Image (tube, grey):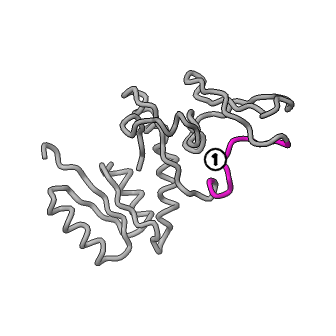
Amino acid sequence: MDEQRLILIVEDDEATRAFLAENIAADGFRVASASSAAEGLRAIEVRRPSLVLLDLALEAGSGLDLLDLLHGKQTMGLYADCENRHVRPIMPLRMTPAVKAGADEPPKCEHGRWQFAGSDYKRKASKWRCPTGECKPASVWIKASRIHPLIPRDSERWQKLPPSSASSDG
């Protein structure tokens, strides 16, 4: 391995943390560890690890909260990095509270679920239309995000995307 990559383990159980650190180090990686979400955040900001192994059920500060915080801090950098490599950032959808509440669904009105009408990469948005065209406005642009990608997940076009053309943050 030309350059040893740093892997950060954020785990509150000391035995699990030690087991992971020992096995990862045995594979030739540099290892750092943290026992709480707060420690993990400081380590991430200072040490800039290549990979973070995060216990999502930390006792002192939720691992999910840390993940949300990191996602918010790093999303723009991730998207920019993808764009610089001419890769369209298509992210997998996690079952967050917003997704469970239906935030990822297309717009709806009394006429039914709105239909995908296309995407504009320059606008970084997708267009949705009322199924009957009776609503005012009859269509809306929705800014692309992790929850609302440029290509809808349930579309035939999404299903045909080869795995190598998608970029993921994990």
The one nearer the camera, 156 or 104, is: 156
Span of residues in magenta? 99-110
Q: How many marks?
A: 1
Q: Name the residue located 16 percent from the left edge and 44 percent from the top edge.
A: 3
Residue 105 spot, x, y in % from top left = 67, 46
Residue 99 spot, x, y in % from top left = 62, 54
Image vertical order of residue 19 relative to residue 89, above or below: below
Q: Is residue 56 left or right of residue 133?
A: left
User: Mark 1 — residue?
Assistant: 104
- SS under mark 1: loop
Crowding near the residue tagged with mark 1, few <14, some 14–19, many ≥20 C-alpha atoms within 10 Å: some
Q: Name the residue located 75 percent from the left edge and 42 percent from the top edge.
A: 113
Rendering quarter of residue 163? top left
* In magenta stretch: residue 107: yes
Q: Name the residue located 73 percent from the left edge and 41 percent from the top edge.
A: 107
Image vertical order of residue 69 relative to residue 133, above or below: below
Q: Name the residue located 35 percent from the left edge and 60 percent from the top edge.
A: 53
Residue 147 spot, x, y in % from top left = 59, 45
Instruction: Identify the main secondary structure in magenta.
Output: loop
Q: Is residue 141 left or right of residue 152?
A: right
Q: Residue furthest top?
A: 122
Image vertical order of residue 59 relative to residue 166, above or below: below
Rendering quarter of residue 29? bottom left
* In magenta stretch: residue 121: no
The one nearer the camera, 145 or 31, is: 145
Residue 34 spot, x, y in % from top left = 34, 65
Q: Is residue 145 left or right of residue 79?
A: right
Q: Is residue 130 left or right of residue 57?
A: right
Amino acid found under the numbered disc labelled 1: Asp
Rendering quarter of residue 135? top right
